[in-house]
Image: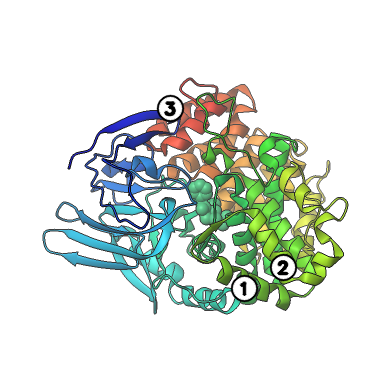
Amino acid sequence: QPLPVESRPFAPYGSVLSIGLPRGPSAGQRLTLEIDYEAGEGPGVCWLAPEQTAGKQKPYMYTQGQAVLNRSFFPCFDTPSVKFTYSATVTVPEGFTAVMSATSWEKQKDNTFVFKMSQPIPSYLIALAVGDIVSADVGPRSRVWAEPCLIEAAKKEYDGVIEEFLTVGEKLFGPYVWGRYDILFMPPSFPFGGMENPCLTFVTPCLLAGDRSLVDVIIHEISHSWFGNLVTNATWGEFWLNEGFTMYAQRRISTEVYGSAYTCLEAATGRALLRQHMDNTGEDHPLNKLRVVIEPAFSVSLGVNPDDTYNETPYEKGYCFVSYLAHLVGDQNKFDAFLQAYVNRFKFQSITADDTLGFFLEYFPELKEKGVESIPGFEFDRWLNTPGWPPYLPDLSPGEQLMKPADELAELWAADTLNMEAIEAVDITAWRTYQLVYFLDQVLQRSPLPEGNVERLSKMYPKISKAQNAELRLRWCQIVLKNNLEAEYSKVKDFLHSQGKQKYTLPLYRAMWGGSEAARALAMETFSATAPQLHVNVQNYVKKILGLEGAE
Ligand code: BES
Ligand code: ZN
C-alpha cells in the first residue's frame, strides 16, 4: 500500500527521508518497503563524459560512497553503524559493463547484471561502476578491470603479486571472507589513491607506474578487508579505527613481504606527510585529534562534515597509537595474535574506540593491572582527545640505511655553494621510488634552496624532474612552487590536468595560492580549465583554498 513520504532538512550533506508506516511494527516482524526514486545531481554518483575517460570514446559512471555520499545514490541508513547485505539488478546500454562491490556477479541477457553481497556491510561500501571496461586475471582469486586501452598495463603492473598480499594478510589477521579480491582502475579524475570497496577495490590509474612501485596502496586497501570492512568504525568521528589500524596492518604485510628497511622508509614518508599536515593546519586544530566531534549542522562554523576528517591525522597519528599499543605489549607475535583475536571478536560489527581499548586491556590483563591506560603523557584519553603531534613515534631506524644517503644528498643540495664533487659521487640511478620520494621531501623541507640550486638539481636528475611516477611528480611540483621556479610551472599544470586525486590536487593549490602572483595566476588558470573534470568534493575544497564563492 502507498505510504506518506516526507523529506526534511538534516545537514548540508543530506536530508531526512521520512516514511510513515500504517502501524508500528512489532518486534521481529519483517517489513518490505519499496522506494521508487531517481538519483539526481548528488555528489555520490559521478557521470563522466567520454573526454573524461582514458579511452575518450564512451561515457562512464561510478559511485563513491565514503564517507556520507551514498545517500545521494540510494535511500539508506547512511551511517557506518548499520550493516546489511544487498543485491542489485543493473541494466546498462549495449557495449557497457557494470561492476559492483559484491560477492557474486552474473551477466544475464539484455545487458543486465545481477549482483549479490552476501556479507553484511555498511552503506558506504556499496559501489557501482559502468563503462567500457574489460578484465584480465592476475591471480587465483583476483583480476584487474580497466578500460581496454589500459588493460594490458594494468595486468602487467599486478600480475602474480596480489595473491601473496592476501595470503600474508590471512596469516596475520585471519580468513579473507570476501571471496574475490579484484581491482578496478578508474578514470583519471577519481579522487582517491584507492577505495576499499569489498571484493573490488577502486584505484587511481596513477598506480600504473610500470614498476609496481606504488603497490603500497593495494596493500593498504587489502588491509581494509579486516580493518574497516570487517571491523568498522561505528561513527566517522572515530575514522582512525579504520585508517590507523589499516596503516598498521599495511605495514605489517609490507614488512613480511619487503622487509623492515623498506617498510620503515615508506613509514617515514608517511610521517613527513603528518608533519606537513600539522604545520599547515596548526597542531592544535580540532581535527588533529583521533576522536573528532561530528554534529549535523547547517552552517560550517558548527559541527564537522564527516568528509572533512579525511586528512593525515587518522592515518598517521592513528598508526602511531596502534604502534604504541604494540610497544606496550613488547612482543610482535603477541600483538599479531591480539589483532587476529580483535578481528574475530568484532567481525561484522561496528565499534567505538572504547570497545577496541576495552578489548585490548581485557586481552592483556597484566597491562590492565599495570594501569597502562593512564601513564602520564601517554594516557589513552590523551591519545584520543588531545590534538597535536603523537606522544609516541615508532622506531623507524631499520630504514636508516635507505634514508641516510637521501638525507645527506638533500643536505648537499641545500648548501650555499654546491659541492658538485660530493653530489656527483652519489649515484641515485638505483634508488627505489620511495627513496627518491624521501629525498624530495627532505629537499622540500629545506626549500627555498639558495638561488640556482633547484635549476641545477633539475638538470642533473631528469629521472626526477621528468618523472612519470605520480608520487615523484607531486613532490617535484611542490619543489617547483616552493622555489618559485617559473620555468617549470608547466609541469604543475600538466600534472593537474592529467589526474584529479585529492591528496595531489589540494597541496598543489595550497602551494600556488601561498606563492607569488604568477603562482596564483597559475592556480586560477589551471582550476578554470580543470574544474569540470574534478570530483565535486575536490572542486569545493579547491574553491575554498582559492577563496571562490560556492565553497561550503
Ligand atoms: N578509505 C580510504 C579512502 C577514503 C577516505 C575515501 C575517506 C573517502 C573518505 C582509502 O582506504 C585510503 O585511505 N586511500 C589512500 C591510500 C593510502 C593511504 C595508501 C589514498 O587514497 O591515498
Ligand atoms: Zn584507507
Task: Provide the residue designation for mark 3.
Answer: 528
Image quadrant where residue 7 sits: top left
- Asked which secondary structure carries label 2, the reply is helix
**What is the C-alpha distance between the residues marked 1 and 3?**
51 Å
Q: Residue 528's x, y, as percent?
A: 43, 27
Q: Residue 188's x, y, as percent?
A: 40, 48
Q: Could you tell me which quadrant the N terminus lies in? A: top left
Q: Nearer the viewer, mark 1 or mark 3?
A: 1
- Residue 267 visible at all: no
Reply above or below: 448 against 102. Answer: above
**Amino acid type, residue under disc 2 in the picture:** Glu
**What is the C-alpha distance between the residues marked 2 and 1?**
11 Å
User: Residue 518 shows which numbered tag?
Assistant: none
**What is the C-alpha distance between the residues marked 3 and 2?**
55 Å
**Amino acid type, residue under disc 3 in the picture:** Ser
- In the picture, measured across the screen, residue 298 lies left or right of residue 9, that is right
Task: Provide the residue designation for mark 2.
Answer: 362
Task: Provide the residue designation for mark 1.
Answer: 341
